[in-house]
Image (spheres, rainbow, N blue to C red):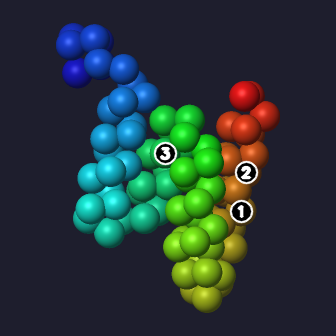
Amino acid sequence: MVGRLGVSPVWVHEATALRALYEGKLLVQAQELIKAEAYDKAHEVVVRSIARELIIKGDTRRLEALLLQLEAGRRTI
């Protein structure tokens, strides 16, 4: 769709993030926002929703991976 229709990849990732929010898939939402380079929005989703769940589950590696992606993205701005 991106190449054939000339749709911006950023727009596709933002749309996918919105669908993930609608479906309650917050981890997917955060990952798609990172791909869309919407780092502030992704950070908000991670901090407000995902972080506490991952900490409670003991899945700190996944949380660390998300935070490292956010950090890397912000450095490119």
Residue 32 horizontal/vertical position (percent): 45, 45
Q: Badges 2 and 3: C-beta atoms under 8 Å apart?
A: no
Earlier along the polypeptide chain: callout 3 or callout 1? 3
Type of the residue with mark 1: Glu
**Rendered residue at 43%/29% (across/down):** 10
Which residue, given by chain and number where applicable, does mark 2 sit on?
68
Give residue 2's position: percent from left, percent from top: 29, 19
Amino acid carrying mark 2 in the image: Leu
In the image as oriented, which residue stretches furthest toward the right? 75
Q: Is residue 68 left or right of residue 46?
A: right
* Relative side of 76 to 9, left or right: right
Residue that label 1 marks? 64
Residue drawn at point x = 70 percent, y = 56 percent: 67
Q: Is residue 22 above or below residue 16?
A: below
Q: Are marks 1 and 2 in contact (CB under 8 Å)?
A: yes
Would you identify the image quadrant in which residue 59 lies?
bottom right
Q: Give the spatial CA distance, label 2 vs label 3.
A: 14 Å
Residue 61 in the image: x percent, y percent? Answer: 68, 67
In the rendered structure, the answer to whether residue 2 lies left or right of residue 5 reads right
In-image side of 5 versus 61 (left or right): left
Q: Amino acid at mark 3?
A: Leu
